[in-house]
């Protein structure tokens, strides 16, 4: 049973435009959400995170939005650059497990940014 | 600063063979993890260690064992490899929700 779902396996956008990556979750006990970026033959690297007490967090070109009532979060990249082409994973931490981590990952979305 | 180091990077095993994947971190993190990544499945937690001397099962522990040798090192052992264990394995460490991943071990079991 997939608790964190990324229903779009891939996304293609033009350089300079906005990329929107989506993630849905089923467990109301998640209290922290993260986005990771992964290039081929490398490990995931942290991009941005958001606590469940907030609905938006921004870091440069990256903004994460959290809609708790819909159990949905999204990552916006503006403007998109060719170097953003990678696999993006949404991840969540269940409440009470912050000391142990136990990230729960979505399936990933492959973003291609065309020059 | 190396972060999280995994060895080996690639490995081919025959069914039934055993091997140990090594992981070491130099960030003085308490928690360490082993994940596997399979196409369309994301990363799934195999085992984790919240602190030195403790280990717990994750989502997919069957067929694996782990050892938290000390605070720096966390190894993953396959006692009798099966084709279903063909995957990319990632080790990670964390402190206060800051996670660092290794570059992965690509394992093929034939």
Image: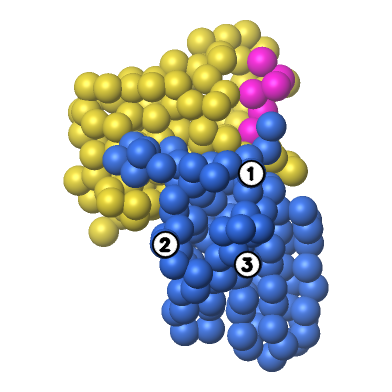
Q: Regarding mark 2 in the picture, which secondary structure is present there?
A: loop
Q: In the rendered image, which quarter contains the C terminus of chain B? A: top right
State which chain is coloured blue: A
Quickly name the residue at label 1: A26
- Residue extent of the magenta highlight: B82-88
Q: Quadrant of residue A80?
A: bottom right
Q: Is residue A88 left or right of residue B24?
A: right
Q: Is residue A72 left or right of residue A104?
A: right
As drawn, B30 above or below A36:
above
Closer to the chain start, of discs 1 and 2, is 1
Q: Are marks 2 and 3 on the same chain?
A: yes
Residue found 22% across the figure and 28% down from its top: B52
Quickly name the residue at label 2: A53
Q: How many marks?
A: 3
Residues at marks 1 and 2 touching, judged by CB atoms closer than 8 Å: no
As drawn, A44 above or below A74:
above
Closer to the chain start, of discs 3 and 1, is 1
Question: Whole-percent x and y of residue B62?
Answer: 56, 15
Quickly name the residue at label 3: A74
Q: Regarding mark 1 in the picture, which secondary structure is present there?
A: loop
C-alpha gap between disc 3 and disc 1: 15 Å
Q: Colour of chain B?
A: yellow
User: Residue B3: in sight, yes or no?
Assistant: yes
| Nearest to the observer: residue A14 or residue B12 | A14
Residue found 55% across the figure and 27% down from its top: B59
Q: Are marks 3 and 1 on the same chain?
A: yes
For the residue carrying disc 3, how many other residues have a C-alpha within 10 Å: few (<14), some (14-19), or many (20+)? many
As drawn, B7 above or below A36:
above
Residue found 67% across the figure and 28% down from its top: B86
Residues at marks 3 and 1 touching, judged by CB atoms closer than 8 Å: no
């Amino acid at each position: 049973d997939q608790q964190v779902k990324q229903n779009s396996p891939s996304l293609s956008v033009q350089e300079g435009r906005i990329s929107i990556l989506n993630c849905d979750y089923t467990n109301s006990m998640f209290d922290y959400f993260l986005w990771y970026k992964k290039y081929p033959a490398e490990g995931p690297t942290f991009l941005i995170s958001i606590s469940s007490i907030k609905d938006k967090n921004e870091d440069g070109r990256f903004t994460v939005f959290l809609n708790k009532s819909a159990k949905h979060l999204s990552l916006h990249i503006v403007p998109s650059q060719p170097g953003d082409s990678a696999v993006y994973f949404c991840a969540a931490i269940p409440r009470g497990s912050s000391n142990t981590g136990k990230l729960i990952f979505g399936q990933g979305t492959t973003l291609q940014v065309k020059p | 600063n190396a972060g999280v180091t995994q060895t080996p990077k690639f490995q081919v095993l025959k069914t039934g063979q055993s091997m140990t994947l090594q992981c070491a971190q130099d960030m003085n993190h308490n928690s360490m993890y082993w994940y596997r990544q399979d196409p369309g499945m994301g990363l799934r937690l195999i085992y984790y260690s919240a602190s030195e001397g403790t280990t717990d099962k994750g989502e997919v522990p069957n067929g694996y064992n782990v050892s938290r040798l000390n605070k720096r090192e966390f190894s993953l052992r396959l006692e009798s490899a099966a084709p279903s264990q063909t995957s990319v394995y990632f080790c990670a460490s964390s402190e206060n929700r800051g996670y660092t991943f290794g570059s992965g071990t690509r394992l093929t079991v034939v």
